[in-house]
Image: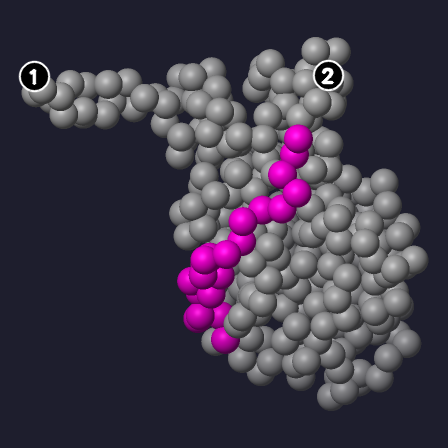
Amino acid sequence: MRLTPRALCNAARAAWRESFPLGGRDVARWFPGHMAKGLKKMQSSLKLVDCIIEVHDARISFAGCDAIPLSGRNPLFKETLGIKPHLLVLNKMDLADLKDQQKIIQHLEGQGLQNVIFTNCVKDKNIKQVIPAVTELVRSSYRYHRGENVELCIMVIGVPNVGKSSLINSLRRQHLRKGKATRVGGEPGVTRAVMSRIQVCERPLMFLLDTPGVLAPRIESVETGLKLALCGTVRDHLVGEETLADYLLYTLNRHQLFGYVQHYGLGGACDDVGSVLKHVAVRLGKTQKVKVLTGTGNVNVIQPNYTAAAHDFLRAFRSGLLGPVMLDRDVLQSAPP
């Protein structure tokens, strides 16, 4: 997004924070512990499955770590589902800054992820690549206990709110000309159980199993947890809307992504979340009455609603109104060539 000369000048002069305070944050509290049940159900359905499609958010598509090659990918997926052919779908590509897409793919390939497709399930971009890729993966692998069946059964897995149900609906639109088969939501936890098979293609005859989002039982890095939360993988109130807004502002400024300045009509880029949220609240009319005790009694004072402003800031980011963002940009840049 283009900025006015004054805004660009202010942005150039600003001294951005070099780090974000991560101490004292209990990441384990953010992530529900009931997901082990979902993983067990997925494991029990594996004998019926020919291939696994793992869906992840393209904005957190890389983290230079062999154990967890994508920010927030559940390492238990590889552990428990690794015997099956595997396709990684990096969804929401329209919201991600993919100028280093080839570098991302190269690093993922170096970590054993050979089959990667970037998609936008809302606009069906690259969706037509999925069925041929899955068909080839199954054709070139041994079908344990499945040799006598003509149809293909595919399990769709991933952390919450990355677009698993959207992928299924998109495949149905492309190959069956039919509408939604699964509920889609902008919050984590819409799919809560391993569902019955959903047909997505006639030739070849293919069925998909939608599954609930499953996070790793322990998120080692607080920053990874914040990235996951920014992408809507956990409910905002568990982390705190203002905390998330502050981390988003910190990230945008460090990466010199100043689309928020133009979107909210700010005078220039700013690294103080309180000032930004106050401006957003006033601009959007998001205020609240607060009782203040004075010497003459209680007085109602109109104050900016910082939580509501933070919510709008996060919504604007998640819907792409602040421009495309790669949350793992710093990790990608520090990765070895």
Q: Are marks 1 and 2 in contact (CB under 8 Å)?
A: no
On whether residue 32 falls in the magenta region, the answer is yes
Question: Can see residue 3?
Answer: no
Tell me where residue 291 appears, x and y as whole percent: 18, 25
Look at mark 1 in the image and give the residue it sits on: 296
Q: Choose top left, top right, bottom left or bottom right for residue 147.
A: bottom right
94 shown above or below 237: above
Q: Which residues are magenta?
A: 15-36
Tell me where residue 12 appears, x and y as whole percent: 74, 23
Say what amino acid the circle numbered 1 marks.
Thr
222 shown above or below 76: above
Q: CA distance from mark 1 to mark 2?
A: 47 Å
285 shown above or below 214: above
Tell me where residue 82 appears, x and y as whole percent: 73, 79
- Residue occupying the point 49% across, 25% down: 275
Quadrant of the drawing holding the C terminus = bottom right
On whether residue 150 falls in the magenta region, the answer is no
Tell me where residue 38 appears, x and y as whole percent: 51, 72
